[in-house]
Image: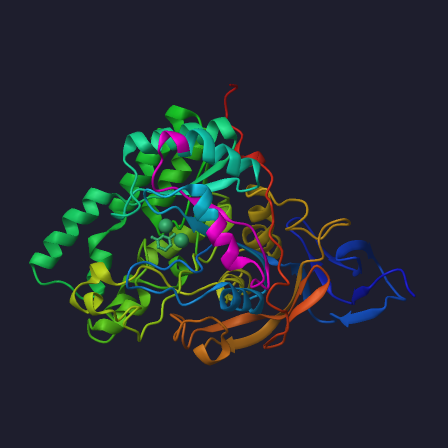
Amino acid sequence: MGDYDVAIRGGTVVTASDVMQCDIGIRDGRIAALADRITGAASEIDATGLLVMPGGIDSHVHLCQNSPGIRMADDFVTGSMAAVAGGNTTIIPFATQPRGASLRDSVTQYQKLAEGNCIADYGIHLIITDPTPSILGQELPALVADGYTSFKVFMTYDEMVLNDRQLLDVFDVARREKALVMVHCEGYDSIKFMTERLEAAGRTAPYYHGKSRPELVEREAAHRAISHAELVDVPIMIVHVSGRQAMEQIRWAQQRGLKVYGETCPQYISLTEEDMKGNNCDETGGKYVCSPPPRDRDGWDAIWEGLRTGVFQTFSSDHCPFIYDSAEGKLNPKGKQSFRYVPNGIPGVETRLPILFSEGVSKGRITLEQFVALTSTNHAKIYGLYPQKGSIAVGADADLVLWDANRTVTISQSLLHHGSDYTPWEGYEVTGWPVKTILRGDVVYDDGKVVGKPGGGRFLKRALSPYAVPNGAD
Ligand code: DUC
Ligand code: ZN
Ligand code: ZN
């Protein structure tokens, strides 16, 4: 019997800080050694010619989040199949509190959907829609203590929106509990105003979704959220930043010394509002409807600027999948009448890493180390999972992706494992593709085939994030 259960041999190991040639020894699901040469393991994986990187952590995915008349295309089984097939080992989806409901009960119910079903390890963020005194005073602190150390709030959507006073109250509790708030920055009233104006003019096709929420709507909300965060002195993460204007707000806040973090996603470096035209402004444009909407090529440049210079810490998918051809999906009866009823979201957990690798590393826009930081290490650090996750170091979980940097693949629905019936990136060519995904030492994805079992993923009780520490003292 050797010293290791598994040895990964001959690969190029990449972390957020280094690129090195070494073998990895794994024992009891953890990395036990990094060495020039490791022999005598019970089994060996040949990584010659491949990159070996920390498994992707996707800190922004939606699974099992149904709403009246609308079904999400992925549950924990299919969503996590797609995740591991895309090179990820950890996902962090959201448990939503419906208005009037207990946050604790919402989390308990959501947790049951995950248990026994998830193939990847998973944490859970909270979505707070009804910040009553008992939610903020009792339930939220208890949940933070139980490892749900981050929560999302919305500045739009009828069923989700918080007004400014509610945002301030939630921010204040986040500061007190040292939890991290994620903010969806789009202004409710501006969107409502624009939507009614567009509908009155008969502009109801999916394409007009983008026109109902132009960049300035996101910019205004980002500025408001930043101002509230400064007033309270609480760090915030502005999620799914779509283009130049919101990026500049975050950069401005960071230059002022505020702890304002930024997340962006594949759709904002690879899709544009033109995609929502579909075929001549028809309903196929609904395949690209997400919020904030894809922008334009100048927006792509701005997002790259933010990725390169550190304005953004995380690159997530915002995987929010619906079936296109379904009365409970993009083509629901009301959605055919107006863009306002087309469910917002696109599938992307499986294609996030290949798109960033291809557009970023293969095209020379970012380094390998930046790629690892943006797709894994920073997620672990920001959401209380580091150093167990997000690194290749002795003692860390052996969560790894073996990556072929030279493989060119044309993305196609037929290759993917998600529950949607389409991918917005059909026909999109990428260079760089995951070959094997390893979760705590076990192979869960092997060159096209998901081999991990539902229930193999563990719930991750997350620590408080060092990124959530306020600037000032108490
Ligand atoms: N916000 C998200 O984070 N995901 C999908 C839809 C939305 O508005
Ligand atoms: Zn959002
Ligand atoms: Zn989302």
Instruction: Write the residue at 49% across / 65% down.
Output: 79
Where is residue 464 shown, x and y percent of the image? 58, 36
Residue 128: say if magenta. Answer: yes
Residue in view at x 43 percent, y 25 percent: 233
Residue bounds of the magenta highlight: 108-134
Left or right: residue 466 versus residue 215 is right
Q: How many marks?
A: 0
Work out which residue is located at the far bottom of the displayed protein and give it.
414
State the image coordinates of residue 215 (x, y, percent, origin top left): 27, 49
Q: Is residue 331 magenta?
A: no
Q: Quadrant of residue 407?
A: bottom right
Question: Seen in the image, is 87 located left or right of residue 255?
Answer: right
Q: Position of residue 404 (x, y in %)?
A: 63, 71
| Residue 315 picture location, percent across and down | 49, 53
- Which corner quadrant holds the N terminus? bottom right
| Residue 182 falls in image quadrant | top left
Would you say residue 85 is visible in this rendering? Answer: yes
